[in-house]
Image (spheres, helix red, strand yellow):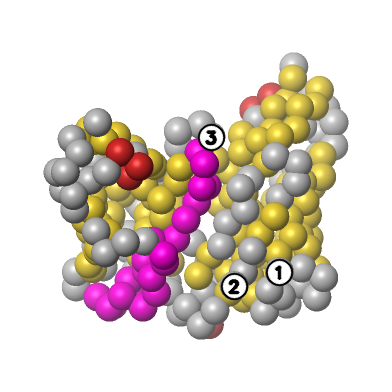
Amino acid sequence: KAGVTQTPRYLIKTRGQQVTLSCSPISGHRSVSWYQQTPGQGLQFLFEYFSETQRNKGNFPGRFSGRQFSNSRSEMNVSTLELGDSALYLCASSYGQAVLTNYGYTFGSGTRLTVV
Amino acid sequence: KQEVTQIPAALSVPEGENLVLNCSFTDSAIYNLQWFRQDPGKGLTSLLLIQSSQREQTSGRLNASLDKSSGRSTLYIAASQPGDSATYLCAPSTGANSKLTFGKGITLSVRP
């Protein structure tokens, strides 16, 4: 079965621009989580969507936003890009309910964003 | 707030050694714990998932144990190979929405 698909794989943007990243979860998974990974901070949780609703949010500024569509696909948007936003952005999908945690999370390959 | 610690940050061993990678976490109220592997510049690959009610889980040369009450998990790698070289991350799942919290990872290098 297909895994978690993230597009694009690589992106170069200029400071001040905005960017949208896409994530398609495993078929049947209703939860999509987003993480930012940098060498200094490691993996940091951005937010999680379940059935089109944001139900968990990390400590990131309001420039970081997301949404989930009815088919569970999710997009993440970063506005007014800063140099410090350069990172690997990872998306993970799961069934999304605590009682179904037998299955854990499956991650995509990530989108490497470089801000210049 | 869950905090995860993985020590040491890096490890270099000769091929064939049996390895123990440690993970500690502060909040024992977890649903489960996952071990992941990450190759440079790549995404995360799930290795093992241990439920909070389980003590250990095995897959091939990998064995993960969980002691929830003491906030510890261990990943055991038997007969290490150069292909095992990667960063290993542990992530307990906590909270009503089973959010993952990651440690900084252990970067393993297995020398031929």
Q: Which residue is mark 2?
A: B1
Mark pair 3, 2: CA separation: 28 Å
Image position of A97 with respect to B72: above or below: below
**Label 1 with label 2: CB-CB less than 8 Å:** yes
Boundaries of the magenta span: A39-59
Which residue is at the front of the view, A62 or B66?
A62
Residue A56 lies within the magenta run? yes
- Is any part of residue A85 visible from this angle? yes
Q: Residues within 10 Å of mark 3 (few under 14, many from 20)?
A: some
For this orientation, the residue located farthest to the right is B17
Residue at (51, 31) in percent of width and height: B40
Q: Quadrant of the C terminus of chain A?
A: top left
Question: Which amino acid does the dot numbered 2 rest on?
Answer: Lys
Q: Specify whether disc 1 shares its chain with disc 2.
A: yes
Q: Chain of mark 3?
A: B
Q: Earlier in the sequence, mark 1 or mark 3?
A: 1
Secondary element at image label 2: loop
Residue at (62, 76) in percent of width and height: B31
Secondary element at image label 3: loop
Residue at (65, 75) in percent of width and height: B30
Question: Which amino acid does the dot numbered 3 rest on?
Answer: Asp
Q: Residues within 10 Å of mark 2 (few under 14, many from 20)?
A: few
Residue at (74, 20) in percent of width and height: B111
On the rendered structure, is B108 left or right of A112? right
Residue A102, image x, y percentages:
57, 71
Question: Which amino acid does the dot numbered 1 rest on?
Answer: Thr
Q: Earlier in the sequence, mark 1 or mark 2?
A: 2
Q: Nearer the viewer, mark 1 or mark 3?
A: 1
Residue B42 lies within the magenta run? no
Residue B5, image x, y percentages:
70, 55
Q: Which residue is mark 1?
A: B26
| Number of the label disc, if any, that sits on residue B39 | 3
